[in-house]
Image (cartoon, rainbow, N blue to C red):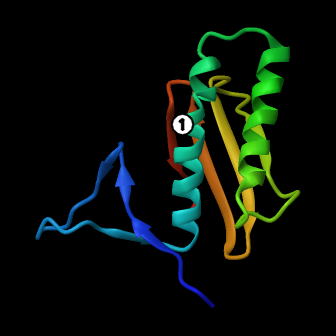
Amino acid sequence: MEQIEDILIVDRDLVLDVASIPTNTHERSVIAQDLKHAIMDTGILVELIAERSPLKWAQNMTKLAELAEEDQRIIPGTVIVERDKVNPGRVFIFADTNLGQITLSGTTDDDLETVTQ
């Protein structure tokens, strides 16, 4: 099987080791990182800031699911986008890949994090 590898980016910056060489990330983490950056590029999370309309929230949640489904590494039909019941500003995205499940968690302040590595 082909190994998926990319440079690790945290807080929109390269992660460097002690020798100032970029750190790599592998497999599911790469897929999650790519999905995270694709979502951040769309601005969908920014649109949800202070949004009170349930209809607009539902539309944007659908957009997030469709965006995730576009990635060929994600198994079609496995993407679940949920709004946190405790913190309504937080969104969870679950998806299955051929390498296992990935989970992203983010708030409407455009700050997504990978939950599952």
Q: Quadrant of residue 105?
A: top right
Q: Secondary structure at mark 1?
A: helix
* Left/right of residue 94 with respect to residue 46 in the rendered view: right
Taking the spot 19% from the left edge, 67% from the top edge, the residue there is 17
* Left/right of residue 25 with respect to residue 59 in the rendered view: left
The residue lying furthest to the bottom in this view is 1
* Left/right of residue 115 with respect to residue 20 in the rendered view: right
Q: Residue 11: x, y in percent?
A: 35, 43
User: In the image, is residue 91 above or below residue 2?
Assistant: above
Which quarter of the rendered picture does the N terminus lie within?
bottom right
Q: Residue 18: x, y in percent?
A: 12, 68
The reply to whether residue 68 is visible in this rendering is yes
The residue lying furthest to the left in this view is 19
Disc 1 crowd rating (10 Å Cα; few below 14, some 14-19, many 20+) is few
27 and 88: which one is in front?
A: 27
* Left/right of residue 54 with respect to residue 42 in the rendered view: right
User: In the image, is residue 5 above or below residue 7?
Assistant: below
Q: Residue 24: x, y in percent?
A: 36, 70
* Tag 1 residue: 41
Taking the spot 72% from the left edge, 50% from the top edge, the residue there is 68
Taking the spot 58% from the left edge, 87% from the top edge, the residue there is 2
The reply to whether residue 117 is visible in this rendering is no
Q: Residue 81: x, y in percent?
A: 76, 41
